[in-house]
């Protein structure tokens, strides 16, 4: 596969033996550079970690690819994605290189040399739960790069190597990713007191018909959360359009709290407003809709201690969310 490097040069690795099967042992500096690129996800980031120029990193990776006679990274519009050969090589060299760095004192430098942990997920969950939970790690020097977004494109980017961890709103399919349950979010039908007083007990008694005259506020035109609530609780299809759409559930929360209408929100996001009376639950079904969020990552990658720390802390924190 022919590729173009950032400095404009091209290379065409030839079919050949597996990594390590070239003409001789790879230079340790090349392997260190390889591991930095593998863990950081880009030549530019690796150059910053190693104190090298980007062209030097590019040249070293090309040299290692010639020695191994295998392509190690797929060049992407943003960063690079490891090939299967790179995953195998990293699994074999990461522990010895880390041990060597520890033995020679090279890992005793401040944490600015550590690769950042790239974490992505829903903006609302990241801001209200995840970042507060990770604050102790940031204070200890762990570098975090946070990307908000929708689950499907974020999982595609995770497969391509742009993220280390992704919080997904559904369990990823296939073997390209592994995932563990992170938290359950309960959905609740809410409105400001002015609307709740007007409606009284009618939503519980009459179902969706009671809400016909109340504006619906949601974060997307296709009303995904509200549609699920209607189907699960009322056993009916939601066939109305939104009065207000805001592509951020925090904006939906703000609009509904101010009296714009009603909506369906995750309880964790509006718990404080429900407790204070700024919002009122319009219906209390015996079996509310529940959605499980998952923490996903790519299997087979060489261990990155800070990624492990972030993952473990989030799993622990998720038990209390």
Image (tube, helix red, strand yellow):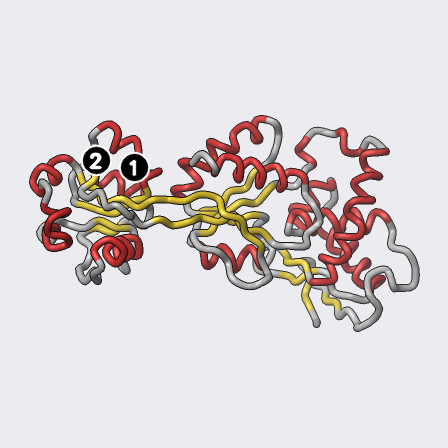
Residue 242, located in which quarter of the rendered image?
Answer: bottom left
Q: Do the residues labelled 1 and 2 touch (CB within 8 Å)?
A: yes
Percent coordinates x, y for residue 36 in the rendering: 72, 47
Q: Can residue 223 be seen in this view?
A: no
Q: How far apart are marks 1 and 2 (CA)?
A: 8 Å
Q: Mark 1 points at which residue?
A: 270
Report the residue at 23% width, 56% height from top.
230
Q: How crowded is mark 2: few (under 14 residues within 10 Å), some or many (20 or more)?
A: many
Q: Can residue 71 be seen in this view?
A: yes
SS at mark 2 in the image: loop
Q: Which of 268 and 48 is in front in this view?
A: 268
Residue at the spot 75% in from the left edge and 52% down from the top edge: 91
Residue displayed at 20% across by 30% down: 277
Say which label, 1 or 2, has the lower sequence index.
1
Image coordinates of residue 263 in percent, x first then y, are 22, 47
Q: Which mark is residue 279?
A: 2
| Extreme residue toward the front, this view | 286
Residue 193 in the figure: left or right of residue 187: left
Query: Which residue is at 81% across, 51% downward?
Result: 30
**Structural crowding at the residue carrying mark 1, measured as other residues with C-alpha within 10 Å and reported as few (<14), some (14–19) or many (≥20):** many
Instruction: Examine the rendered structure and indicate whether residue 95 appears above or below residue 90.
Output: above
């Amino acid at each position: 596969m022919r590729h173009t490097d950032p400095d404009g040069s091209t290379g065409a690795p030839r079919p050949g033996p597996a990594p390590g099967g070239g003409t001789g042992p790879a230079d340790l500096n090349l392997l260190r550079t390889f591991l930095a690129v593998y863990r950081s996800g880009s030549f530019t980031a690796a150059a910053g970690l190693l104190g090298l120029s980007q062209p030097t990193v590019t040249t070293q990776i090309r040299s290692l690819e010639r020695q191994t006679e295998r392509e190690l990274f797929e060049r992407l519009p943003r960063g690079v994605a490891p090939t299967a050969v790179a995953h195998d090589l990293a699994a074999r060299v990461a522990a010895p290189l880390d041990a060597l760095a520890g033995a020679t004192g090279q890992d005793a430098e401040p944490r600015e040399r550590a690769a950042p942990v790239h974490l992505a997920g829903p903006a609302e969950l990241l801001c209200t739960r995840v970042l507060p939970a990770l604050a102790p790690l940031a204070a200890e020097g762990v570098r975090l790069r946070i990307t908000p977004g929708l689950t499907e494109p974020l999982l595609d980017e995770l497969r391509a190597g742009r993220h280390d961890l992704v919080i997904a709103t559904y369990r990823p399919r296939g073997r390209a990713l592994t995932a563990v349950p992170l938290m359950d979010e309960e959905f609740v039908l809410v409105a400001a007191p002015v609307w709740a007083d007007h409606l009284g007990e009618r939503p519980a008694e009459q179902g969706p018909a009671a809400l016909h005259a109340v504006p619906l506020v949601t974060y997307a035109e296709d009303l995904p959360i509200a549609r699920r609530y209607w189907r699960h609780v009322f056993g009916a299809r939601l066939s109305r359009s939104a009065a207000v759409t805001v592509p951020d559930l925090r904006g939906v929360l703000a609009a509904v709290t101010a009296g714009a209408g009603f909506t369906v929100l995750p309880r964790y996001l509006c718990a404080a407003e429900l407790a204070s009376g700024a919002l009122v639950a319009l219906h209390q079904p015996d079996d509310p809709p529940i959605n499980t969020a998952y923490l996903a990552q790519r299997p087979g990658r060489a261990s990155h201690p800070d990624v492990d720390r972030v993952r473990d802390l989030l799993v622990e924190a998720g038990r209390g969310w």
